[in-house]
Amino acid sequence: MIITLNIYEKFALIYDELIDDIDYEAWGEFIKKVIENSNRKPQNLLEMACGTGKLTTELSKFIPYIDAFDISSDMLAIAYNKFQHNENVKLYNLDMVDFNFNKKYDLIICGCDSINYILNPNDLDKIFHNVRGHLNEDGLFIFDINSHYKISKIIGNNIFLNDKDETFYTWDSSFDEKSEISDYYLTFFVSRGNNLYERFDEHHRQKAYKTEYIERMLIENGFNRVYKYSDYSFEQVDATTQRICFVASIY
């Protein structure tokens, strides 16, 4: 028996299970190493698009105070369960494009290719401008993107099938060369026992940004130093890098 639903918040409930191939601990260690190499000692951090708080958990191990936000209240509900007893982590329901805090931060983070979900380059410009305004003069802005190569060539116009424990899903992707936007149509079947499966559908969209464009926009918004790495490592970026990590600073 299959129940068919179209409820966005269902995705939040299985997100941690599905994204188990990301080594958040390694990401946290990379960020910690970047901080150490730059001789900085950040006391506070702003995390944009924190999702269910998996990266937040790693960051909280070495950052004294964290403000984290996400546009999805359902993702934040999962994150809240992780930090409800941690007074040093505060969660907010905000949009990346127009967030506003009346303070500045030593470190601003945006992980899990959240930047790719910004489809309008003007909105991306607003985000970088806003981040610059919320960053202390000696602060760092660290974020990652799915590379143009990954979105256009690896994901491209393909169909993926995946079976993870109690969840089976299909991923049908369509990449538009002109807009450089990829549409992801996902259908999930989640086992509820007794041969009962719950179905729900998701539609995600990501824009493929070229590295040079991201770098230029950062510089135009006051980031004078921009470093690029392959994934969350210190490997150099090449033509087939699939995840690019940017480390940007004002000085």
Image (cartoon, rainbow, N blue to C red):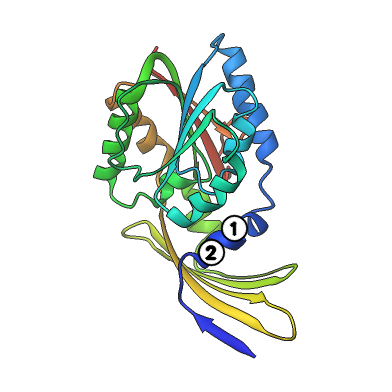
Q: Amino acid at mark 2?
A: Phe
Q: Does the residue at mark 2 contact the one at mark 1 (Cβ under 8 Å)?
A: yes
For the question of whether residue 188 can be seen, the reply is yes
Q: Is residue 83 left or right of residue 213?
A: right
Quadrant placement of the N terminus: bottom right
Mark 1 = which residue? 15
- Kind of element beneath mark 1: helix
Which of 42/88 is in front? 88
Q: Measured from the top left, where is residue 125 in percent x and y?
A: 27, 37
Q: Is 6 rendered above or below residue 90?
A: below
Quadrant placement of the C terminus: top left
Residue name at image x 37 percent, y 56 percent = 180
Which of 16/203 is in front? 16
Q: Is 142 rendered above or below residue 8?
A: above
Which of 5/238 is in front? 5
Q: Is 65 rendered above or below residue 41?
A: below
Crowding around mark 1 (Cα neighbors within 10 Å: few <14, some 14 to 19, many 20+) is some
Q: Amino acid at mark 1?
A: Tyr
Q: Is residue 191 left or right of residue 147?
A: right
Q: Measured from the top left, where is residue 133 in percent x and y?
A: 29, 24
Mark 2 = which residue? 11
Residue name at image x 53 percent, y 64 percent = 11
Determine the image quadrant of residue 136: top left
Crowding around mark 2 (Cα neighbors within 10 Å: few <14, some 14 to 19, many 20+) is some
Residue name at image x 51 percent, y 48 percent = 51
Residue name at image x 61 percent, y 44 percent = 82
| Residue extending furthest toward the left | 122
